[in-house]
Image (cartoon, coloured by chain):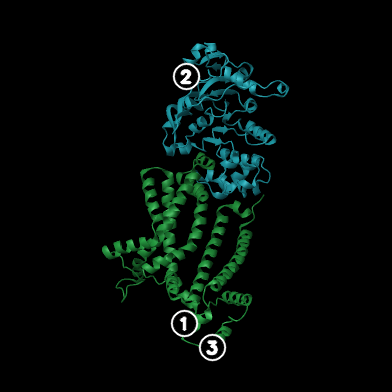
Chain colours: A green, B cyan
Amino acid sequence: MYAPGLKTYIIKRLLSALPTILVVIVINFALIHAAPYDPALMLVGEAGYVSKEYVARIRAEYGLDKSLPEQLLVYILKVVNADFGYSYFHGEPVLRIIAQAIPATLLLMATAFTIAILIGIVFGIFSARKPNSMTDILFGILSTAGYSMPRFLLATLVLWMFSLNLGWFPSGGVRTVGGYSGSDVVDVLTHLCLPALTLATYDLALVYRLTRTSMLDTLAKDYIITARSKGLSEKTVLFKHALRNAIAPVVTTSGVRFGLLLAGAVTTETVFNWPGMGRLIYEATLLGDYPLLMGTFVVICMTVIISNLLVDIIYGILDPRVRLK
Amino acid sequence: MSMSVKTLLINKTKTYYFTRFGTVRAVDGLSMELGEKEAVGLIGESGCGKTTLALSIIRLLPPQCKILEGSILFKGRNLLELTEKEINRVRGREISMIFQNPSSYLNPVMKISEQIIECITNHHAMKKSEAEEKALEMLTKLRIPEAKQVMRCYPFELSGGMQQRVVIAIALIRNPVLLIADEPTTSVDATIERQILNLLNELKENLSLLLVTHNLGVVAELCEKIYCMYAGKIVEYGDIFKIFENPMHPYTSGLLKSALSIDELKKKIMVVKGDVPSLINPPPGCRFHTRCEHVRPICSKQEPPTVKVGKNHWASCWLHY
């Protein structure tokens, strides 16, 4: 019963992601067609009264007169060629608008994610080493608060406290309007603090709780006694023997969460006026900019699929038994 | 008895678990000794405190468990007085332990080679390649076929017997003075048991062995001396042949009678009646009196002292006082 090599495992995983992507595109297409509106009327709508011939011409131009399966095929081919159409509101290709918003979102998400993972894991291990100590109980209370606080409320509170009242951080945007006297990096970082912390809070609490529970479980395992009986240092026992076993649920959840973080960014980016994907979704929803909305959905779905794929791969590296399945 | 320093001298040690149901007196004022290159068996029913005693020696008890009294002298040094750092230097280097269930005692996500060589690269500054060489040598010595491939395996890719040999390799790689084997053959089948026993038989030439088991056959094969444990206390100890021929404590004789041998299979199997008493509220006086067929009034009132009942043979029972 030898486990297959890592390479085979990764290739298998990659291949299994392809059908998922196809399903996502189909669901996306179905969503558009389930929506109670006629895209052709939507397109001509702003022109006021138009003739039936004009609507029919628009239909033909956009391929809307074809049968549904045909339309689906066209849509799939377009998405595969990274063609998401034009935004109604911006009048620009959807892809270009999304590409412009991605760096800001990625910066915000990566920062929030790193904060959540690093601090969550370290504090989780710390708590698991001395369960029911004063610090453990305190962290437990804090994490429950962070876990259950709605993000829009947290964002507003943080904004009110640290920006409006204390004036430590700017209230929104990526850079100071009208230029900043210091370095650009410092300017962006000070703008990043509040939204990143707001976005990180939920996942920080989640990662902390998962790590704590999983570590407590692992530290009671027999092989930890073996590790200790070898005379290894506490550091080696904790990080090499325990954490590697305990980290699996954390990895799984964080992968899923990373994809969903983009959805969570909607509130955060809106409150802090952060010019990323989240705000783009918010605006597209308000304006009824369907091509843009569908484009962002595809991007979110792809992020979820890719992060899940990464989780599977990391999981396979961490635990060779997973590769068997 | 020679005058030289004993490898292991446990003196009136008490190890208690503090649970929400009460204090479990798993090891309750227990003494035993083990000489250099001596093989000693510790026998008793499940739940009598054998494993707790074994773990007390290398101080790897769970957090709710504390050693309250007594001393555990290892080559004259009291292990209970060492700092965490000092005891950590004893573990694996001078005292090693092998466990009951090899599959749960090996780290599931680490390669066999990693799990063996970390024992040697840890304290001495040995090169990784050198350590790997040594690990391979050890596996070959333990007669593991295709040792090179096994080094690259994960525990779940090996059979139970192979896993147990890996556990033994981990324990032996640093040439310990004392090997504690806690039920080393309980979870393996009969052919593997034979192989492991042959292996331990060879190994005990070079080290002191404390064998913890409820399997009397295993003890008979490996040990010169046995300690019989009941409810946290030693009830009888001494030369193995003396005890097997003529057990002086009713519990020991019950335990021996309950063991099977081929020609006895036709007869009714004897069992020690009753259950192991709760170690939260152990019976007063002699702890065995609730199950003893020779019980007398004094047994429930006073604890019997340990008396010499023959050459190299001691028992704690009012029958012999």
Quadrant in the picture for residue B253: top right
Residue bearing the label numbered 3:
A54
Q: Is residue A310 left or right of residue B148?
A: left
**Depth check, front residue: A282 or B130:** A282
Mark-to-mark CA distance, 3 and 2? 102 Å
**Depth check, front residue: A309 or B76:** A309
Q: Nearer the viewer, mark 2 or mark 1?
A: 1
| Mark 2 residue type | Pro
Residue A229 percent location from the top left of the image: 51, 39
Residue bearing the label numbered 2:
B284
Residue A311 percent location from the top left of the image: 54, 59
Tag 3, which chain? A
Q: Mark 3 near mark 2, Cβ–Cβ under 8 Å?
A: no
Residue A144 percent location from the top left of the image: 40, 52
| Mark 3 residue type | Tyr
Question: In the image, which disc is placed on residue B265?
Answer: none
Q: Nearer the viewer, mark 3 or mark 2?
A: 3
Label 1 environment density (alpha carbons within 10 Å; few <14, some 14–19, many ≥20): few
**Depth check, front residue: B221 or A94:** A94
- Element under disc 1: loop
Q: Residue visible at 44% across and 64% down?
A: A264
Tag 2, which chain? B
From where the camera sits, is residue B11 visible?
A: no
- Element under disc 2: loop
Q: Is residue B46 above or below residue B107?
A: above
Q: Residue visible at 66% across and 34% down?
A: B193
Residue bearing the label numbered 1:
A91
| Mark 1 residue type | Gly
Mark-to-mark CA distance, 3 and 1? 20 Å
Label 3 environment density (alpha carbons within 10 Å; few <14, some 14–19, many ≥20): few
